[in-house]
Image (cartoon, coloured by chain):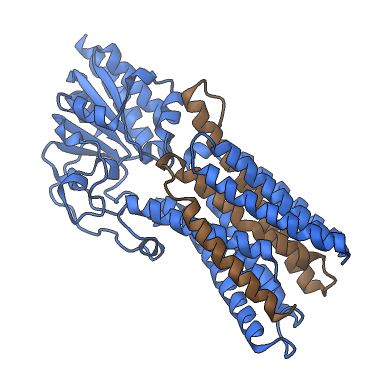
Chain colours: A blue, B brown
Amino acid sequence: MSTAVGVAVPILYLASAVFFILGLKRLCRVRSARGGLALVGGAFLLALLGVAVEAGRLNPIPALVGLAAGMVVGLAIGYGTKVELGPGLGPLLASAGGVASAALVVAAYATDEVWPSASIFALGGGARGAALGLGFVSGVAALVFGVLAAAGPAAGGAGQPAVVALAASTSGLASAMVGLALGNPIVATVGGLVAAAGYSLAGIVGKALGRSPLDIAFGRGRGSDEYANVKACGAEEAAMELETARKVIVVPGYGMAVAQAQHALADVAKVLAANGTKVLYAIHPAAGLIPGHMNVLLDEAKVDPAQLREWEDANRELADADVALVVGACDIVNPAAKEDRSSVLFGMPVIEVEKARTVFVVKRSLRPGASGAKNPLFERPNVTLVFGDAKKVLQGIGVELKAQIKAAA
Amino acid sequence: MDSGLILWTVMMFVLAAFVGHHVIHGVPTLLHTPLMSATNAISAISVVGAIVVAGAEYETVRTVLGVTAVAAAMCNVVGGFLITERMLRMFKGNTGPKDGGR
């Protein structure tokens, strides 16, 4: 290695690491987030440039083939994923990172060139062996977390966003271990950076749900309590109640996004408005999978933004509401958050739908929300569940409502 | 590769972990998901190590594993980066006329 190359590589790696740190820092502030992402992109280019210089005398063909293949698949996923519907294929990407690291570990074991040998001092050899072992384990863990998160809450990916963060964290740890074993400083440094950032982020997200990252990793803290005295009805009865209501507050949640029920919902709201009913939408900050999720979906269904209310205003409006219509939400309307000190949700802001005269909850089943907590709302005397897919139920309510209004006219 | 190098890299790894923990302190809820997505993309930094393994003149098994690793990691980087960018654009679209997302 010539002197120029020997100096250029560490400088490129150092600049790359600094860019990664500054980029992450900026990603944590709303105004600078996009600039932060651009810095991260630049950091990646610097790291790749560094390795290109470092590996200059190596055969570039295999690496280029891999880069091209990965880029094509990455572009397809990056543009093909529906961001509004939540992470989608995103978490699976973390799995891909885990697989990459695991494959590298196997490659390192495959011959005794990187791994083994009497020629390496006991300490160095032992540390390298440990790094490879840990790298493989965390690579596999990243794969498991990624698949779990992608499978969604319905398949038991409880505390889903936190699981995505854990997938990123373990994938980063696997990268770092590979970096240690290969003696590559940028891989070890940046791997360590994201392993810790991802773990802390899982902690921050998990805290909102009252659980530690380890609880989330092992799926602890899910309520399995049985429900008693739950009332249920069909679309017809719900439509009858809605037809006579003067004021209706709609509370959309993740279930509306999954069922893509926003258009059917907006349709019902339009019929109600034409019938002289005041309709408002209560938007909880944690509704859906990403903040702003509900706003985007309702905007898509052409709901007037003037009808949207933040949770605090919504709670005031609920006091004199005739009907609260909860569409595919659970944790964000759980009264345990303010009444039950032992609840994992205790202290979280909730929309107090039980203050309305009548509450209808459109939901597929009594399964808990992302927190896993039981929802005592469903046992309240003024609450009735309408079981089913949100889109189908709302379409049914829409048809019934139109028929009833026509009959009354 | 001597044993001294791995100890230096262990040191960097540990220091970087402290930085990683502190750098995301106080992130607002709004940015949780994009930040998660970005850390996910960054976590595939092992692409750099994979390039070295894929390019070295090893026997076929290792080259194949190396190329697989390069492809998987690169897919994570590019896909994660794009998804993050689209999320951030979507938030921007929320305040003004909507252009982002699909």
x and y, in percent, of residue B1 in the image: 75, 77
Left or right: residue A386 versus residue B68 is: left
Asked if residue A100 is positioned above or below residue A367 in the image, the reply reads below
- Residue at screen point 86% across, 63% down: A3
Which one is nearer the viewer's eye here, A76 or A259?
A76
Residue toward you, A33 or B68: A33
- Which residue lies at the image location 59% right of the left edge and 61% below the top edge? A191
Write down the quadrant of residue B11 in the picture: bottom right
- From where the camera sits, is residue A125 visible? yes
Image quadrant where one finds the C terminus of chain A = top left
Residue A154 seen in this snapshot: no
Given the current orientation, which residue lies at the most extreme left position? A381
Q: Can you name the residue that lies furthest to the bottom here?
A: A118
| In front of the other: A385 or B46 | B46
In the picture, residue A279 is in which quadrant?
Answer: top left
Instruction: Give the number of marks.
Output: 0
Q: Nearer the viewer, residue A218 or B5?
A: B5
Query: Residue A190: where, in percent of width, then height?
Result: 61, 59
Q: Where is A64 relative to B100, above or below?
A: below
Q: Position of residue A30 (x, y in %)?
A: 48, 36
Please tell me which residue is depicted at 15% across the width and 33% down the height of the picture.
Answer: A355
In the shown orientation, is residue A350 left or right of residue A108? left
Q: Which residue lies furthest to the top in this view?
A: A409
Q: Position of residue A396 (x, y in %)?
A: 32, 29
In which quarter of the view is residue A82 placed?
top right
Q: Which quadrant does the N terminus of chain A fall into? A: bottom right
Point 62% across, 51% down: residue? A20
